[in-house]
Image: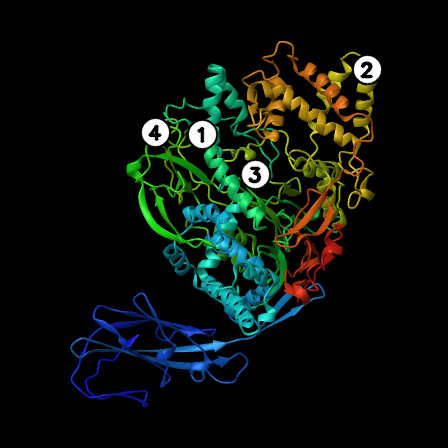
Amino acid sequence: MIKRFLVGLLVITGMVFFGQGQSIALNLADIETPSEKAIQDFEPVEVLVSFQEGANPDTFEAWLNGQNITDRFTATENGMKAQLTRADGLRTLDEGENGSIKGKGRNFLNTYVGGAGHKKDRDRVKFYVKTGMVETVQDDKGVWFITGSDQVSLYYIFEAMGYAVAADRLWQMETYRRQGRGTLAEIFGPDQLPTDVFIRTIGYSDEELTQGFLNLEPDVQKVVKGYIAGINRRINEIRNDPSLLPFEFAALGAKLGTTFIPADWTHGDVLSWIAMLLRNFDPEALDTGQMDNAALYQNMVAQFGASGSAMFQDLRWTNDPEAQTYIVGGLTAAGAVVPEDVDNDDDFSEVAEQMKARCRDFKEKLKKIKAHVKMGSYAWVVSGDKTESGNPILYSGPQMGFSVPSIVMEGSLQAGGIDVSGMSVPGIPVIIIGRTPHHAWSMQVGHSHTTDYYLESPDSVFLHRYETIKVAGQNDVILPVFRTSHGPVVNPMPFDPTTYESDPANPIVAWKYVHWGYEFDTIGGFLKLGKATSMDEFGAAIENVGVSQHFCYADRDGNIAYWMSGRDPLRPAGEWRLPQGAAGIPLEWDADVLIQRSTDRNAARGFYGGWNNKTNPDYASGFNDPGTAYGPFHRSHVIYDYFEETISSPDGRLSFENLRDLALNIATTDSFGSGGNPWKFVANDFIAAVSDSESDEDRQAALDLMSDWDGHFVSGGPDFWAWGMDRADAWVLMDVWIRKVINMTFADELAVDDGSGNMVLKESKQILFNVLLHGLAGSESGIVNNYYWFQNVDSGAPQAADAIIVAALDFALAELGSRPWGVGARGLIEYNHLMLETVHTMPFSSRSTYAQCVEYGADGPVRIESMFPLGESGDIRVGAGGAPVYDPNFFSMTPVFDGFTHRPFPLFDK
């Protein structure tokens, strides 16, 4: 900025004159943006003028290239702002146009503001603008391809992406941004008020979102600005032509008695949504495992005395050397420390149930409006040494549910130095899982220890802000948001210090999240993942990903690699399965001091892969999510079993089709782990127990049935995996038999009243199955149980494993009756729309929502295939009589996706 302090007559660029008179030149204002001699590669140009003490806003005037543009400005908290385009006299050098940016693209911005006592301040900046163009085309399925020159601005690329996404998914984006912002009750009414309270409590303030945006790297800011501008271009088209309004807005508007056209998007919408999306992908972020563990420990000790601590240890191990891992190698530590006695006076049973119910209610209410987001995922990458072509091949299958429309969409960006195609989520301005001319990558939910709960004293709590929640049909609700030094107060929720009384059953609990403040950088992380030109650059980009995910990777240089992203702080030794303060002095950690990243390159065994299992043998788990307490059984075993059978020999080679179709193979396994074959892990013990029992034709027939089984829940073999509707009788027997063994083993110690007089096991069946496996293995188990779970408090019940197994088989056979058991029992995946109910169905499988299979030659991808559910478009319009009219590409992917056929995706231009 160049200051011009003049007295009397002032001429600005030879055109604008100020009146004569005595004046005092002072610094009353500053042009913050654009800066002097700045070069901007897109329009509009954002102008921000800040006022200093003594400035009179009513005197403000501005000129662009001699043209008065004062009316283009609006007031801010302490200044003025404007968005300037060519319509305001902005000069630009267009892409491909002859001339110099310092000629055709040169601009002068002048401002004036006065103050008391003839004080005046005049400022001027000179800046330059160049512009570019991109083109968007769609294929026969509606997938968008955005292309442009290497010089075009990121702004224009992502403006085109934002527009394309909004044209297809505007209603879905509305529910997502309201989830991120905590504004669902404004359109859905009081039923969603608790959801908004939860989101606002653990969310960022408007000021934090603004600062988070300002802290982004300039290129990332440009991406977000462009994406928002594209969305808003579509919204403006709807304002000008209401026939473009999606069905859901019209229907909900009619219910609310208004015309419901979405407001313009802001950077806060994008940042709050990505933060919420990432937390939904984090198994610890929205879980209450530490609180549940404290309640479990107290209950075990209260019921069983000294044995209770041993029982807790069996149920909450942290490191099993027999767990399947992405990276193989020796385990240097196993098990977990024996927990200290809970010396806190709090009664954790009630508060744990309150907090769990709150999280459960949050997810259920999102499901009710079809806005719940979840993620699992399977993936594998195989080196060229193990493929028929000699090329590395990667398969990625993120599991994100089956919403209407799908949570995913597909696209391609080839402009401005970006060359990437793949999967995106509406509202997120990047390709999240994809491929480039250099490499491809997958993502699967990881298990970094990201969340800890802290028990707090009342004097540690402070008021952070007030939030106003609008509720359809009711008065606004004012929500005070309280925090401690650790983070938001999440119990009681909402917290009210004027009425709160210390209560052992209702302690103050704060939520400390390691990715707090780092989540926004994930946009830049994904941008860098797609722009990387080496394995090292890709690994560096992983450091910007603010969520725990497993990444598999393949590139044209023949490399395969693996990382687990996410921040995992270096914690002091102590009891981290419980909330801090429950067992001794609370321990602290620094989010900037992390343990070593779990990563590996070019594995000797020739592959990486998994299904949300453990990253490496030394990585402890299960702290705030018992589901990540990995044991001998995990559904990922079906991937490792396949590779063991096919490429363990020196001559083992797999084709593109083999690796692509492995997805259907594993998706047709099923268990309480949502995949996998538990029978493999108990077959020897179960067969031995039955064989040693009294001879019985029914028992022997059951063993014969199991011996002929292929391990898939779909009956009939591979030809029926995609479309067959019968479950294998062997699977039905296995499932009932194992569940009864689990119940007969653990119910006497762990069953609780469900409120209706029924005694049920609330512990995860997968955890209990692994404890069962630990018990069956005895002293040879990687985790040796401290308590003998096969004994029963009922002296008339079986008291040993073999007796339980045989009795459970008899009960199972009696319950099932005569065969066949599985006819028509496969089940369906239903696609349910918020307002239109079930719009599509397909046979059930433990399958992914998106899939890509990519093979790399020396010059880049030689083959790409992909698929996703329903279609690229989620656009529904209002037809005659108010009937819904679906976009032609609403269901266009179903012939590809439903039958696991995949489809070719274009390779990159050379």
Q: Residue at position x 48%, y 47% from top?
A: 195
Q: Nearer the viewer, mark 2 or mark 4?
A: 2
Q: What is the CA distance from the residue labelled 2 to the residue labelled 3?
A: 45 Å
Residue 696: give its label. Answer: 2
Q: Nearer the viewer, mark 4 or mark 1?
A: 1
| Residue toward you, 309 or 258 | 258
Image side of residue 381 versus residue 66, left or right: right
Q: Are marks 3 and 4 in contact (CB under 8 Å)?
A: no
Q: Which callout, 3 or 4, points at the residue further toward the start of the chain?
A: 4
Q: Are marks 2 and 4 in contact (CB under 8 Å)?
A: no
Q: Position of residue 662 (x, y in %)?
A: 73, 44
User: In this view of the protein, can residue 448 be seen by the observer?
Assistant: no
Q: Where is 267 relative to 816, above or below? A: below
Q: Nearer the viewer, mark 2 or mark 3?
A: 2
Q: Position of residue 252 (x, y in %)?
A: 56, 59
Image side of residue 600 versus residue 882, left or right: left
Q: Nearer the viewer, mark 2 or mark 1?
A: 1
